[in-house]
Structures are given as C-alpha cells and as structure tokens.
Image (cartoon, helix red, strand yellow):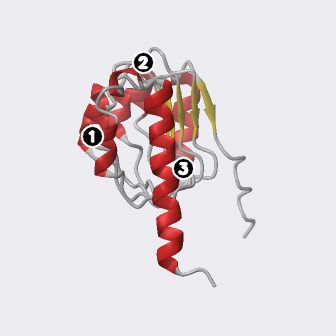
Amino acid sequence: MIRKGDRMGEAVARVARKVNDTVENKTDSLDLANCKLMTFPIGIYKAMRSVTEGIHCISLANNELKSLTSRFVTTFNQLRELNLAGNYLHRLPEEITSLLHLRAINLSRNRFRHFPEHLAAVTTLETIDLEENEITEVPVEKLASMASLRSLNLRANPVNPEVRLLVRPLVPFDLLLSPEEPVPKA
C-alpha cells in the first residue's frame, strides 16, 4: 500500500531531480510537466538563481496550477516558450508583458473565460494556444495589431458567432476555431 505522503515525497524528489539536471547541465529548458504542482515551488527560484537568465523554455503542463505569480514571470524573463497546458489557470499576471522574447505560449485545457488581454502587449508572440477553455469574447482590434502573431488556437471555446465574422478579414494570422455548430431548426 502506497501512502499519500510517499507519493508526495516522490513528486518532490522528481521536481528536485529535474531542477538539478537543468542547473548542472546548464540546459535552456526546465520540464516540470506532470509533477502534480499546485504552485510553482519557491525553492526553485533559489536553486536556479545562477541559470535563470539562460532558461528559454519551461513546461508546467498537466499540473494543478491555479495561478502564475509575477515573481515567476520576472525571474524567468528570457522565456521564449511557456507551456501551461492542462492546469486550472483563469488569468495571467500583468507582468507577462515583460517577457520580451516570448514566442509561444500554450494555455490550452485551462479555465480562461476571457482572452488574457495582457498577451496582446507581448509583441514577440507568434503562437497562442487557448484550445479548450471557456472563452466567448476575443479582443479583435488588439489581436489585429500583433505584428508577430502567426497562429491563435481557440478551438473548443464557446466563441461568439460575431467574432468569427469580425476576425477573419481583420487578422493576418491563422485563427483556429472549432467548426460552427449547425443552427438548430425550430
């Protein structure tokens, strides 16, 4: 029989191993996917102090994160890719705009009800994945001004039908939406 404490200990050890690998090998990525994290462990900031500037890619996919702190964003300010898919996020800190090199963000399978508008200020973003959230409204004008954006995935979101009509002629990037539901006949 495995006690809950044992599983927690294993999870903590796995996170520590992954952090140590990143620090020792001076790799540019940190993969903490599937680690059952409810928050980003504060101890990691200290453990990675010497290498944070060199971290370009972080995956925190498939954890249990409810929020992302401004400290996380300002510490890992050289990020180019951030994978936060499969968590319980519903907003991003305003400091996300300080990620001046961010090219791709995956926020699929989270709890966003509104498009995270701070992302529109991240001028380097090329790919935004928001598949399987609860987004109905999209800030079309802000998105249309994002010069680097190549792809926005809003599949499996209850996006308002008007958005479909407005967005197509305005945006120069690939907008991925679920096929329209046929209108039920009365």
Res. 164 image quadrant? top right
Q: For this view, does 151 lie left or right of residue 146?
A: right
**Residue shown at 48% from the left, 50% from the top:** 15
Of the numbered discs 2 and 3, the one sitting upstream in the chain is: 2
Q: Quadrant of the C terminus?
A: bottom right
The image shows residue 41 at horizontal and vertical percentages of 34, 52
Q: Regarding mark 2 in the picture, which secondary structure is present there?
A: loop
Between residues 28 and 81, which one lies in front from this camera angle?
Answer: 28
Q: Regarding mark 3 in the picture, which secondary structure is present there?
A: loop
As drawn, which residue projects farthest toward the top?
147
Circle 2: residue type? Thr
Q: For this view, does 35 lie left or right of residue 114?
A: right
Asked if residue 127 shows in the view, the reply is: yes
How many other residues sit within 10 Å of disc 3, few (<14), some (14-19) or many (≥20)? some
Q: For this view, does 68 lie left or right of residue 147?
A: left
Q: Nearer the viewer, mark 3 or mark 1?
A: 1
Residue 125: mark in rendering: none
How many other residues sit within 10 Å of disc 1, few (<14), some (14-19) or many (≥20)? few
The image shows residue 10 at horizontal and vertical percentages of 53, 63
User: Which residue is under mark 3?
Assistant: 159
Q: Quadrant of the N terminus?
A: bottom right
Residue 124: mark in rendering: 2
How many other residues sit within 10 Å of disc 2, few (<14), some (14-19) or many (≥20)? some
Circle 1: residue type? Lys
Asked if residue 136 shows in the view, the reply is: no
Between residues 65 and 134, which one lies in front from this camera angle?
Answer: 65
User: Which residue is under mark 1?
Assistant: 46
**Residue shown at 63% from the left, 52% from the top:** 156
